[in-house]
Amino acid sequence: MSDLASAAVERVYREHRTRMLAALVRALGDFELAEDALQEACSQALRTWPRSQVPDDPFAWLLTVARNHALDRLRHVQMARAKLPAPPPEPVTMTEKQLVDIGDERLSLIFTCCHPALNEEARLALTLQAVAGFTAAQIARAFLVAEPALAQRLVRAKRKIRDAGITFEVPADHLLPERLSGVLTVIYLIFTRGYTTADAELRHEAVRLGKLVAALMPDEPEAHGLVALMLLHNSRSAARLTTEGDVVLLEDQDRALWNADEIAEGMTLLDRALRFGTPGPYVLHAVIAALHVQDRVDWTRIAALYAELLAVAPTPVIELNHAVAVAMVDGPEAGLELIDGITGLNDYHLLHSARADLLRRLNRCDEAIAAYRLAHELAVSPADRRFLAGRLRSLETS
């Protein structure tokens, strides 16, 4: 096998896989058929190109061959059902306009993978596989799921799209805000998973997906806001944990470890998003993240922004963040009162950790110890458990 041919196939597949898959799914209406056809085209390229030469446009070659394979398979299936001999395949070539239009199909692919008819786990897995190119093994490892179960989840999701006749397209204008929100939620869930498990690959892939959506939908401020939010959070990732993997609080982080380029890029995107007018939830979150990377954190403004978020996108976690910010402005008693009024987070270790910290600041040590113990029991991350155990020891021995 020619090293040149092999490298060319690998490069085109890596750079254009999502575009080619999107075009094939659009043409065929079947995820599994599109994936199989693309793999067969790559296999044929590895067999053919070393004997001849790499085509002038390897992307168009792979896409054309993949479509021909898929159409040929469909013809054979139709002939078999009718019990007639299959006619010789008629080759299909990609026109220049079709090639130009493929860039737009990536957005349709993302919206299809994040369709509300699929459950959240299926949307996450399908987006990571179809759009990001992750293998089933990689996704299973990232989300702590057995690989066979994850593979079955992907198969069911693809077949549901086919059998339910889910249209492969960007939603109509009146449906776009809600559907876009669903897409951004999936991307942020991928990032959050990578952030909480210190999985840099997941974080970077979420940022890449966010940038793709923002590039394809340049007039959507929430898309720019989400990318800004992820970049600003990610900029501090090298300082969040010690070399031993222990948690470092924001006020104790070494700012020299923060990624200045990501902060600058995030600020630029945030500025662009804010120019559109009334900010949405992701833009507001990004403004808060931007305040956290300033030399002096403006807690008064952060508390006000969380209050604004509660008005537009109320959740118990936002209530908790608002309470913590209020405690920084008005004192631990005010924050504790708000935390004790939150419902729905009984199993969320960060609520009990925040409550314990406020009780500690109020010198209510026995209550703080009990809250830290509960937070430690609920925490899953080893880094979080070590941090909470350290807080417990410091209180118990004081």
Image: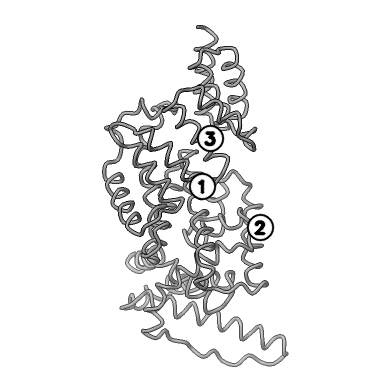
Mark closest to the chain's N terminus, 3 or 2: 2
Q: Secondary structure at mark 2?
A: helix
Quadrant in which the N terminus appears = bottom left
Crowding near the residue tagged with mark 2, few <14, some 14–19, many ≥20 C-alpha atoms within 10 Å: few
- Measured as percent of width and height from the top left, residue 285 is found at 43, 45
Q: Is residue 94 left or right of residue 80?
A: left
Which residue is labeled 3 in the image? 320
Q: In the image, what residue occupies the spot 60% across and 34% down?
A: 342
Would residue 231 be found to the left or right of residue 115 on screen? Answer: left
Query: Which numbered dot is residue 161?
Result: none
Residue type at mark 2? Answer: Gln
Q: Nearer the viewer, mark 2 or mark 1?
A: 1
x%, y% of residue 375?
59, 26
Q: CB of mark 3 within 8 Å of CB of mark 1?
A: no
Give the residue number, with chain letter if any, for mark 2.
152
> Label 1's element?
helix
Amino acid residing under circle 3? Leu
Instruction: State the CA–CA distance, disc 3 to disc 1.
Output: 14 Å
- Rendering coords of residue 137 (x, y %): 56, 51
Position of 361 relative to 75 (above/below): above
Q: Residues within 10 Å of mark 3 (few under 14, many from 20)?
A: many
Which residue is at a point 51% across and 44% down the rendered structure image?
A: 310
The mark lying in front, picked from 3 and 1, is 1
The residue type indicated by label 1 comes to: Ala
Question: Quick check: 102 left or right of 375?
Answer: left
As displayed, is residue 259 above or below residue 358?
below
- Which residue is depicted at the point 49% across and 72% down? 173
Residue marked by disc 1: 311
Q: Earlier in the sequence, mark 3 or mark 1?
A: 1
